[in-house]
Amino acid sequence: MDDFEKEYPGFDWKNTPAYKHPGGKDCPCPKHEYIREQMRVAQTISESNKDMPPEQRQQGKITLKFCPDHYDVYFNEVIPAMPFKYRFMTKVALKIGAITIQKLTYMQSDQCFYCKFGSGGFDKKTELPPI
């Protein structure tokens, strides 16, 4: 993260859509790192199921939990920024239920994947949002 800030001083990667980042898909920012991680997860599930008959295939039940802010980031920025192949696989996985997305409340943001691991999102919520 520090290297990214040194290379691109003043670049607001949190509030800039992923497709406008420097370096395109090879951008070293946390947002693109998260996108690459999601592609690796989809690829691993695909590879492990390649040589097995359909009834013995691994059912990759993955539940991703996002706070309201990161839920929007995932659907509006992360998925559209993926290359077509991975975007298609992610959408199919969502439709067939291999990946489940759970939208948390702000009170549960300590369980949010982005907030918990800090990869490509906003900082952890330190106070309650306005009601």
Image: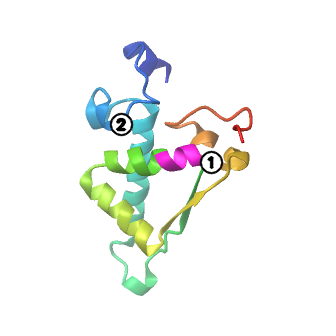
Residue 102, horizontal then vertical, whole percent: 59, 60
Q: Which residue bears the numbered disc 2? A: 18
Cβ atoms under marks 2 and 1 closer than 8 Å: no
Q: What residue lies at 64% left-to-right and 54% top-to-bottom? A: 104
Residue 19, horizontal then vertical, whole percent: 30, 37
Say which quadrant the C terminus sits in.
top right
* Residue stretch rendered in magenta on the structure: 67-72
Locate residue 113 relative to residue 60 in the image: left or right: right
- What secondary structure is found at the residue carrying circle 1? loop
Q: What residue lies at 39% left-to-right and 37% top-to-bottom? A: 32
By secondary structure, the bulk of the magenta-drawn segment is best described as helix
Residue 45, horizontal then vertical, whole percent: 42, 64
Q: What residue lies at 27% left-to-right and 49% top-to-bottom? A: 83
Locate residue 42 relative to residue 113 in the image: left or right: left
Is residue 48 in view? no
Q: Which residue bears the numbered disc 1? A: 112
Mark toward the start of the polypeptide (2 vs 1): 2
Three-letter amino acid code at the position of disc 1 = Cys
How many marks the image carries: the answer is: 2
